[in-house]
Image (cartoon, rainbow, N blue to C red):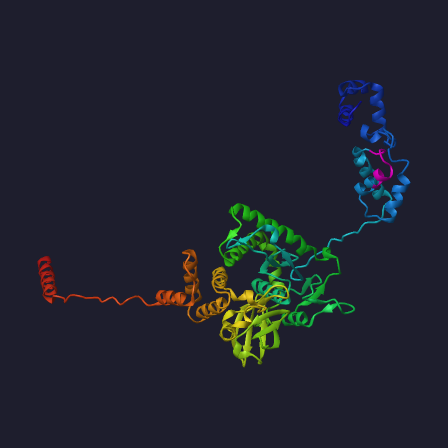
Amino acid sequence: MLTDQQVRKLMKLVKTEKSLSSAAAKAGMCEKTARRYVRSGKLPSESAAEHAWRTRVDPFWEVWEEVVGLLRNNPGLQAKTVFEDLQRRFPGRFADGQLRTLQRRLKVWRALEGPEQEVFFAQEHRPGELCQSDFTHMESLGVTVGGQPFDHLVYHFVLTYSNWETGTVCFSESFESLSAGLEGALFELGGVPRVHQSDRLSAAVCNLQSPPGFTDRYAALLRHYGLEGRMIQAAKANENGDVEQRHHRFKDAVDQALMLRGSREFSTREAYEAFLRKVLGQLNAGRRERLAEEVPLLHALPPRRMDGFKRLRCRVGQGSTVSVEHNVYSVPSRLVGEQVEVRLYAEHLEVWCAQRKVETMARLRGRKGHRVNYRHVIGWLVRKPGAFANYRYRDDLFPTSRFRMALDELERHSPQRGHREYLKILELAATESETLVDAALQALIGGGQAISFEVVEAMVQEAGAPPPRVDVYIDDVDLERYDAMLDGWAFAQEAGR
């Protein structure tokens, strides 16, 4: 069987040889065959007839109409699902090895007769025009901080023209996280693009409207920076394709950098954030030229950032607590009955009263959580010790595991008064030093000694007492020695002259 290479050689030899028979002989074919190819001007691959017949019996020809009916009613059916259905309905007729045959047939049917597939249209990006942002989960990377899993998200910001990107560590898809991330990205960039596009985040888009619109807080944020807001359609993540694709590539780059680092453990959150900044800097290094085209076209930043917190008015309940975003926080008991202002940030909240900040605490994640600081309520618990046994937030009154162990030990020795003794120890921690009390409890528990308030108080006072005074004695200085030194120096000076 002749090959395309032989015929190409023949076509070249025909131009140089004196006869066709000589060219054919050198090309490795007879003269008659050579004449046919010279006249047609086609290669063997171009002259071959299309293969339109089957080489073996189709095992699905009797049930093919049923298969097509299933696919027309449910285009998303996979070949394996259809094959397993056929095996159930026709036991012993189809062997497992015929699955690949059905997969090939369905692939051809979908290409020739199946439903139309969604078409994606490539977009032309202009410098300084569009930025996209979204949150991405980072738990899959297995990062730990201080030996504990660090479950977090990254607010991810991308310029669609240059692909310049940056990110901020956060813990929820809240408006505060969105605001802090967007403002941080714009100030790091040094300018403001014309349009900001996001998906339908509940922090930015109110989906209860018809049609859906931006929330008041997000609209105010856009106005402050002169941004035009744009949202994608529901369930159409591809419309935010640039940032979605960068999610994958960014996490892949972080994962590779962690492998090179040889450890996914970081001593502090700050160390991990510095590591992410380094990875982002490496990713952006090759985008400087296109970024340089964008920067002159960006709008100027406003003189200051927008307040990155939400103001809430709350009344302090009788339990010395306030409810903020479906979570409970304790405040100093002197505020009971007062109306306070809570400033809710992405990761912490502040309690203000009479224009003064009275408390700062970490923000709880999720809902139905509680954070009660024992220092806020211990004074009244000592006066009302009976309330401790069934206190709703009792678990918050154990600063460390040693305090929990101390209560168990006290109640084991004195079921009636053990909790009273514990509350006195807890009050000691609030008024003196939690660290010293914890150290005392650790020493007593480790040594198998009995725990009591008096013993713990004595240990705390001893550990906290200032060191004994040390009297320092300095002998009188003999000034005649200095006179002798000066005389010797003067004599040396004279001898040098």
Q: In this view, does 369 lie to the left or right of 15?
A: left
> Depth check: 28 or 12 in front?
28
Q: In the rendered image of this protein, does residue 347 appear above or below residue 58?
A: below
Q: In the rendered image of this protein, does residue 129 appear above or below residue 247?
A: below
- The x and y percentages for residue 433 are 42, 67
The stretch of residues the image draws in magenta is 85-94
Which of the 4 image quadrants contains residue 486? Answer: bottom left
- The x and y percentages for residue 497 are 10, 59
Q: In the rendered image of this protein, does residue 146 appear above or below residue 326?
A: above
Which of the 4 image quadrants contains residue 196? Answer: bottom right
Q: In this view, does 146 lie to the left or right of 205?
A: left
Identify the residue at image location x=51%, y=46%.
Answer: 262
Q: Is residue 448 left or right of residue 266?
A: left
> Depth check: 47 or 205 in front?
205
Q: In the rendered image of this protein, does residue 185 appear above or below residue 147?
A: below
Looking at the image, can residue 308 be seen? no
- The x and y percentages for residue 133 are 65, 60
Identify the residue at image location x=62%, y=71%.
Answer: 324
Q: In which quarter of the image is the N terminus?
A: top right
- The x and y percentages for residue 371 are 56, 67
Identify the residue at image location x=85%, y=41%.
Answer: 109
Q: What is the count of numbered marks? A: 0
- Indicate whether residue 96 is drawn in magenta: no
Looking at the image, can residue 368 be seen? yes
> Depth check: 456 or 291 in front?
456
Which of the 4 image quadrants contains residue 455? Answer: bottom left
- Indicate whether residue 86 is drawn in magenta: yes
